[in-house]
Amino acid sequence: MTAYVDDAAILYKGKLRYHMTADTLGELHDFAHQIGVNRCWFHRGARHPHYDITTEQREAAITAGAHAVTARELLSAAKRLVESSSRAAAFDSA
Protein backbone atom coordinates (compact mmCIF):
# COMPACT_ATOMS: atom_id res chain seq x y z
CA MET A 1 0.00 0.00 0.00
CA THR A 2 1.27 3.45 -0.86
CA ALA A 3 -0.17 6.63 0.59
CA TYR A 4 1.05 10.11 -0.27
CA VAL A 5 0.93 13.41 1.65
CA ASP A 6 1.77 16.73 0.09
CA ASP A 7 3.48 19.91 1.27
CA ALA A 8 0.60 22.26 0.36
CA ALA A 9 0.34 23.92 3.81
CA ILE A 10 -3.01 25.64 3.16
CA LEU A 11 -4.26 27.77 6.06
CA TYR A 12 -7.87 26.85 6.89
CA LYS A 13 -9.66 27.83 10.09
CA GLY A 14 -6.38 28.68 11.79
CA LYS A 15 -4.63 25.38 11.00
CA LEU A 16 -2.38 24.30 8.19
CA ARG A 17 -3.94 21.64 5.98
CA TYR A 18 -2.39 19.17 3.59
CA HIS A 19 -3.73 16.57 1.17
CA MET A 20 -3.47 12.80 1.34
CA THR A 21 -4.16 10.26 -1.39
CA ALA A 22 -3.14 6.67 -2.18
CA ASP A 23 -2.86 4.19 -5.02
CA THR A 24 -6.44 2.93 -4.56
CA LEU A 25 -9.55 4.23 -2.80
CA GLY A 26 -9.54 1.23 -0.48
CA GLU A 27 -5.95 1.92 0.54
CA LEU A 28 -6.73 5.59 1.00
CA HIS A 29 -9.68 4.96 3.32
CA ASP A 30 -7.84 2.22 5.23
CA PHE A 31 -4.80 4.44 5.72
CA ALA A 32 -6.93 7.40 6.82
CA HIS A 33 -8.67 5.17 9.36
CA GLN A 34 -5.32 3.82 10.56
CA ILE A 35 -4.03 7.31 11.42
CA GLY A 36 -7.36 8.54 12.83
CA VAL A 37 -8.57 10.80 10.02
CA ASN A 38 -12.35 11.18 10.02
CA ARG A 39 -14.11 10.12 6.81
CA CYS A 40 -15.83 13.53 6.66
CA TRP A 41 -12.50 15.01 5.48
CA PHE A 42 -12.62 12.90 2.32
CA HIS A 43 -13.31 14.90 -0.82
CA ARG A 44 -15.43 12.46 -2.80
CA GLY A 45 -16.68 14.97 -5.35
CA ALA A 46 -13.26 16.47 -5.92
CA ARG A 47 -11.62 16.09 -9.28
CA HIS A 48 -8.94 14.04 -7.56
CA PRO A 49 -9.99 12.01 -4.48
CA HIS A 50 -8.12 13.03 -1.35
CA TYR A 51 -8.39 13.75 2.34
CA ASP A 52 -7.61 17.10 3.92
CA ILE A 53 -5.33 16.51 6.90
CA THR A 54 -3.74 18.63 9.63
CA THR A 55 -0.04 18.99 10.36
CA GLU A 56 -0.33 16.41 13.14
CA GLN A 57 -2.13 13.95 10.87
CA ARG A 58 0.47 14.52 8.13
CA GLU A 59 3.24 13.67 10.62
CA ALA A 60 1.31 10.56 11.73
CA ALA A 61 0.88 9.53 8.09
CA ILE A 62 4.60 9.86 7.40
CA THR A 63 5.42 7.91 10.56
CA ALA A 64 2.98 5.20 9.39
CA GLY A 65 4.73 4.98 6.02
CA ALA A 66 3.17 7.59 3.73
CA HIS A 67 5.46 9.18 1.17
CA ALA A 68 6.00 12.92 1.63
CA VAL A 69 5.73 14.48 -1.83
CA THR A 70 5.25 17.86 -3.44
CA ALA A 71 1.74 19.07 -4.24
CA ARG A 72 2.45 18.42 -7.92
CA GLU A 73 3.57 14.84 -7.22
CA LEU A 74 0.45 14.23 -5.12
CA LEU A 75 -1.71 15.50 -7.96
CA SER A 76 -0.04 13.00 -10.30
CA ALA A 77 -0.73 10.18 -7.81
CA ALA A 78 -4.35 11.30 -7.46
CA LYS A 79 -4.76 11.33 -11.25
CA ARG A 80 -3.46 7.75 -11.39
CA LEU A 81 -6.01 6.83 -8.70
CA VAL A 82 -8.85 8.28 -10.79
CA GLU A 83 -7.61 6.48 -13.91
CA SER A 84 -7.27 3.13 -12.13
CA SER A 85 -10.71 3.54 -10.54
CA SER A 86 -12.21 4.29 -13.96
CA ARG A 87 -10.58 1.21 -15.46
CA ALA A 88 -11.83 -0.96 -12.60
CA ALA A 89 -15.38 0.40 -12.98
CA ALA A 90 -15.31 -0.27 -16.73
CA PHE A 91 -14.07 -3.82 -16.12
CA ASP A 92 -16.76 -4.45 -13.49
CA SER A 93 -19.53 -3.28 -15.82
CA ALA A 94 -18.35 -5.40 -18.77
Image: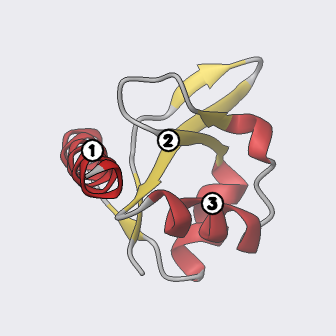
The residue that disc 2 covers is: 50
Name the residue: 76% across, 54% down: 37
| Front residue of 90 and 46 | 90
Is label 1 in contact with label 3 (beta carbons under 8 Å)?
Answer: no
- Tell me the mark number nearer the camera, choosing from 1 and 3: 1
| Of callouts 1 and 3, the N-terminal one | 3
Name the kind of residue labelled 3 in the image. His
> Quadrant location of the N terminus?
bottom left
* Residue 36 x/y as whole percent: 81, 63
| Mark 2 to mark 1 CA distance (whole Å) | 16 Å
**Element type at mark 1:** helix
Give the color scheme: rainbow, by chain, secondary structure or one colour. secondary structure
Give above or below for 18 relative to 45. below
* Residue 75 x/y as whole percent: 26, 40
Give above or below for 76 relative to 11. below
Residue at the farthest top position: 13
Is label 2 in contact with label 1 (beta carbons under 8 Å)?
Answer: no
| Front residue of 72 and 11 | 72
Name the kind of residue labelled 1 in the image. Ser
| Front residue of 3 and 83 | 83
The residue that disc 3 covers is: 29
The residue that disc 1 covers is: 86
* Residue 84 x/y as whole percent: 24, 55
Give above or below for 6 relative to 28. above
- Tell me the mark number nearer the camera, choosing from 2 and 1: 1
Name the residue: 75% across, 66% down: 33
| Mark 1 to mark 3 CA distance (whole Å) | 17 Å
Name the kind of residue labelled 2 in the image. His
**Element type at mark 2:** strand
